[in-house]
Image (tube, rainbow, N blue to C red):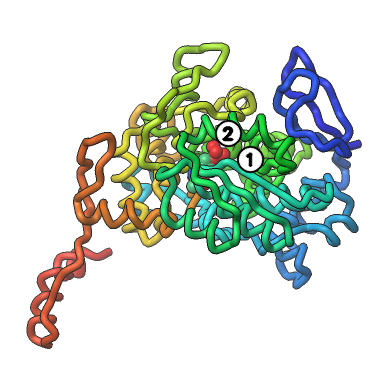
């Protein structure tokens, strides 16, 4: 049957899914949601999932619930009655020659989770997290967030008629994300502390405040996020890419991807595990540091620093799961600089794809791994773009104005694209256009 399983080897306790818990009541360890799958039936699931793309049923239209055989924490009837879905998932897999060239690869593809309703992969997880809250009869849901979790939780909770409460570090989240939390009706607290400090506080207070916590320590969110891998593999015709590259903050996503891929392998739907590459910003890279020093425990970074606010996390909660998945898949963790993130982001934008800063760390990381010879030029690399371009317009405008700064240092804007001022007059416009676009037209192709 289905149950919670404490991932600590020294504990390994199990609990029925009916219990309202997020972490192991015995030892405080992280929990997995585990299922007893029907391995024989699984061979037919890809056909079933594919068929649902033509269905008009609400549940089938979701890019998460379409794969509900992989997340059977509710029965089919319960899922149909309770699932809180806003049509998440079903995101495109985009090929970019420009990005491949930049990374030094023959080809490169981007799975763009910014196509979700609230513009990030948090929607893939939140649909399951909020559905679980509803199934438990919780009214008040809360999260501590660097921005995207609060935007997503606000939307899903309000859509379900629950009350969202968000705690965000004051002055440290991107403008688009704060705007979303407010517009979607979240009770919003800007707290004078960083993400890690607020999270510690709210972990302690959640129960007395009556909050159902929807941070990524909540294993049901990771269950939703793991279906991103099923959708990706479906788009790849069930042929495993060599590498899946993603940014790492609180490390929930890499944990979800790893679990999802292992389950697909155990079900016989793929033969081998793609290698996971987690990319962190240099100023917020506790996992990279831990892997490099071969330490047994993660040492938190007291004051994480990066303009990629979505991964500005010094004490990632899910690190034990992340380490497990990197080991299982032969994965790696690398850190990239602010300049490398800014350059990669501009390349992804110029390619007509666009993403928020944290997402661009993937291309910067792929380039670095390629240069180091870890990734071969002909390997099949898929990068996960975690968030939408418009999440952080401030970063973009500063970049193109040549005013992007981090820690008091000005970054170079190598692909700056400045708006031009022109008189309202035909000849002036024509001359200006010829001057501005001439090079690009002759150099096209
Ligand atoms: C949340 C988030 C991340 C980090 O994901 P984790 O699961 O915390 O590692 C990266 N990019 C974006 C855009 C995010 O919203």
Quadrant where the C terminus sits is bottom left
Give whichever of 236, 192 is nearer the camera: 192
Q: Which of the two labelled residues, at mark 2 and mark 1, occupies the earlier sequence position?
A: 2
Q: Is residue 103 left or right of residue 276?
A: left
Q: Mark 2 and mark 1: span between their CA atoms?
A: 9 Å
Q: Are marks 2 and 1 in contact (CB under 8 Å)?
A: yes
Tell me residue 425's x, y (percent): 11, 87
The residue pinned by badge 1 equals 215
The residue pinned by badge 2 equals 199
Tell me residue 207's x, y (percent): 74, 35
Badge 1: residue crowd in 10 Å (few <14, some 14–19, many ≥20): many
Give whichever of 230, 159 is nearer the camera: 159
| Vertical comparison of 230 with 179: above or below | above
Q: Secondary structure at mark 1?
A: loop
The single residue placed furthest to the front in the displayed view is: 208
| Vertical comparison of 68 with 264: above or below | below
């Amino acid at each position: 049957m289905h149950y919670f399983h404490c991932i600590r080897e020294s504990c390994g306790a199990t609990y029925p899914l009916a219990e309202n818990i997020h972490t192991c009541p015995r030892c405080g360890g992280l929990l997995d949601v585990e299922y007893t799958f029907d391995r024989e039936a699984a061979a037919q699931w890809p056909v079933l999932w594919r068929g649902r793309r033509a269905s008009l049923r609400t549940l089938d239209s979701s890019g998460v619930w379409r794969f509900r055989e992989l997340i059977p924490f509710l029965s089919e009837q319960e899922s149909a009655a309770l699932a809180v879905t806003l049509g998440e998932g079903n995101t495109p897999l985009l090929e970019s020659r420009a990005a491949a060239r930049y990374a030094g690869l023959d080809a490169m593809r981007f799975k763009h989770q910014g196509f979700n309703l609230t513009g990030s992969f948090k929607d893939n997880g939140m649909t399951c997290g909020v559905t679980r809250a509803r199934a438990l009869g919780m009214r008040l849901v809360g999260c501590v967030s660097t921005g995207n979790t609060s935007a997503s939780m606000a939307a899903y909770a309000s859509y379900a008629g629950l009350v969202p409460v968000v705690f965000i570090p004051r002055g440290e989240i991107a403008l688009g994300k704060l705007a979303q939390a407010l517009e979607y009706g979240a009770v919003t607290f800007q707290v004078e502390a960083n993400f890690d400090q607020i999270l510690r506080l709210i972990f302690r207070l959640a129960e007395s405040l009556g909050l159902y916590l929807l941070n990524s320590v909540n294993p049901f969110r990771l269950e939703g996020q793991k279906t991103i891998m099923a959708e990706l593999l479906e788009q790849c015709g069930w042929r495993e890419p060599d590498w899946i590259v993603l940014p790492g903050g609180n490390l929930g996503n890499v944990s979800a991807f790893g679990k999802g891929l292992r389950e697909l392998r155990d079900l016989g739907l793929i033969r081998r595990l793609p290698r996971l590459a987690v990319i962190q910003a240099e100023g917020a890279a506790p996992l990279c540091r831990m892997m490099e020093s071969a330490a047994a425990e993660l040492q938190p970074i007291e004051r994480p620093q990066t303009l990629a606010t979505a991964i500005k996390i010094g004490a990632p909660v899910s690190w034990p799961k992340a380490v497990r998945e990197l080991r299982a898949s032969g994965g790696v963790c690398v850190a990239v600089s602010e300049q490398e993130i800014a350059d990669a982001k501009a390349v992804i934008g110029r390619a007509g794809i666009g993403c928020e800063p944290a997402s661009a760390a993937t291309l910067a990381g792929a380039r670095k791994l390629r240069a180091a010879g870890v990734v071969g030029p002909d390997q099949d690399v898929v990068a996960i773009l975690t968030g939408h371009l418009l999440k952080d317009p401030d970063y973009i405008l500063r970049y193109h104005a040549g005013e992007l700064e981090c820690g008091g240092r000005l970054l170079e804007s190598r692909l700056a694209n400045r708006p031009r001022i022109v008189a309202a007059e035909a000849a002036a416009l024509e001359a200006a256009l010829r001057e501005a676009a001439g090079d690009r037209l002759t150099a096209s192709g």
